[in-house]
Image (cartoon, rainbow, N blue to C red):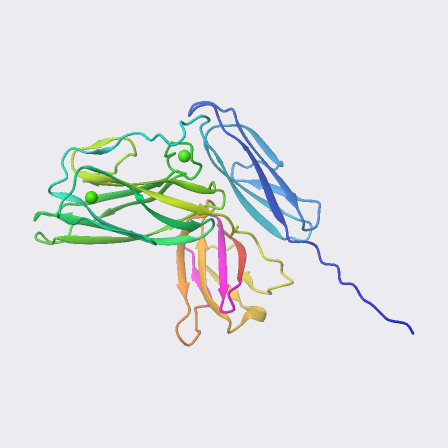
């Protein structure tokens, strides 16, 4: 008796391994980054944000470098290489604080399991709250709520948050600056004023515990290692876990397409075999920062387009989350 068998061979998902050599100092171009693709269908082509088209880059200054690899079938995967400064001093961080924190101070910080608020209605200029920690996963975004306390008169407050993603003891700017925004003052007499932001954990973040520094400076943007005339600085701990890399899902799994792509004013979605099964879409920039998130309404309806005419030219990743808990990702070029 003959038994017929059929084997369907599909290429493995395209994945990228990254090797990074840090630079000797901020002004030294002694760093390098190399990407090694596997899976997909060779040959591969390479596109770095520097314009490079080879698997590796050398003579790099500290900074963030993005590479997109395309295989012979048009599948793409993107990786972000952070070239840091070598020997940054482990877990010893620069000091920062405020000379005066009694008119405007950081009153509360809320992010995941970090839930800290002042009990004595003012503050100390610098507070080491590293005993408070939250767990985050690479490739995901997390809301953070930052609350200013005012004694009576209100001021414009400039928030910045840094996370030492590569655990070298330095808050590289801007690769590790995850919030930078000014909060306009509420009316005098407002005691508490909360600003809400989203923090994205890059796929390249080092696994383990690291420092998050939050600075709130009156009337100007803070830097991570300064004494502020007015405002406050607080440090916290994040525990970074693995998983969740941003990459294209094979077209054989989802037939979702974006068109036109490249786009310049509006991009449309063809939901394909996932029609009616879309829970939300999220858009990330090339270094993995969450730019926007659209949720389907309770009836499962979601816009099938995005207006991109005000976006900067460049490469974006669009993550399409389905109601069965999976994610399809597509690369979008805005020109
Ligand atoms: Ca405080
Ligand atoms: Ca760092």
Check the image and name the residue furthest to the right. 1
Check the image and name the residue furthest to the front. 131
Q: How many marks?
A: 0
| Relative to 44, residue 95 above or below | above
Residue 202, image x and y in percent? Answer: 46, 45
Check the image and name the residue furthest to the bottom. 299
Residue drawn 50% across the image and 62% down it: 320
Residue 55 appearing in the image: yes
Answer left or right for 197 relative to 183: right
Q: Which of 189 and 122 lies nearest the eye of the viewer?
A: 122
Residue 334 appearing in the image: no
Residue 106, image x and y in percent? Answer: 20, 45
Ligand 2 quadrant in view: top left
| Relative to 29, residue 12 above or below | below
Residue 61 magenta-drawn? no
Residue 311 magenta-drawn? yes
């Amino acid at each position: 008796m003959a038994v017929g068998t059929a084997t369907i061979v599909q290429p493995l998902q395209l994945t990228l391994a990254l090797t990074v050599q840090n630079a000797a100092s901020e002004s030294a171009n002694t760093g390098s980054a190399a990407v090694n693709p596997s899976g997909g269908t060779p040959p591969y082509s390479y596109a770095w944000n520097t314009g490079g088209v080879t698997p590796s880059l050398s003579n790099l200054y500290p900074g963030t470098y993005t590479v997109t690899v395309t295989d012979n079938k048009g599948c793409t995967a993107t990786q972000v290489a952070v070239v840091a400064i070598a020997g940054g001093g482990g877990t010893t961080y620069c000091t920062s604080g405020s000379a005066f924190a009694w008119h405007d101070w950081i009153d509360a910080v809320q992010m995941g399991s970090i839930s800290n608020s002042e009990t004595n209605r003012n503050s100390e200029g610098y507070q080491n709250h590293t005993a408070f920690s939250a767990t985050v996963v690479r490739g995901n975004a997390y809301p953070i709520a930052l609350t200013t306390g005012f004694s009576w008169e209100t001021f414009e407050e400039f928030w910045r948050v840094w996370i030492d993603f590569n655990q070298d003891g330095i808050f590289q700017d801007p690769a590790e600056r995850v919030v930078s925004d000014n909060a306009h003052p509420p009316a005098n007499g407002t005691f508490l004023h909360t600003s809400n932001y989203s923090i994205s954990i890059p796929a390249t973040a080092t696994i383990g515990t690291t420092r998050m520094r939050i600075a709130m400076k009156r009337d100007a943007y803070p830097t991570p290692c300064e004494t502020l005339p007015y405002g406050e600085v607080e440090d916290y701990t994040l525990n970074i876990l693995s998983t969740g890399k941003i990459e294209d899902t094979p077209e054989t799994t989802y037939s979702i397409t974006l068109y036109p792509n490249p786009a310049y004013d509006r991009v449309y979605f063809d939901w394909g075999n996932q029609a009616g099964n879309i829970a939300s879409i999220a858009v990330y920039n090339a270094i993995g920062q969450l730019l926007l998130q659209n949720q389907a309404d309770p009836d499962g309806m979601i816009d099938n387009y995005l207006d991109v005419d005000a976006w900067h030219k460049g490469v974006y990743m669009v993550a399409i989350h389905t109601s069965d808990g999976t994610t399809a990702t597509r690369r979008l070029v805005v020109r």
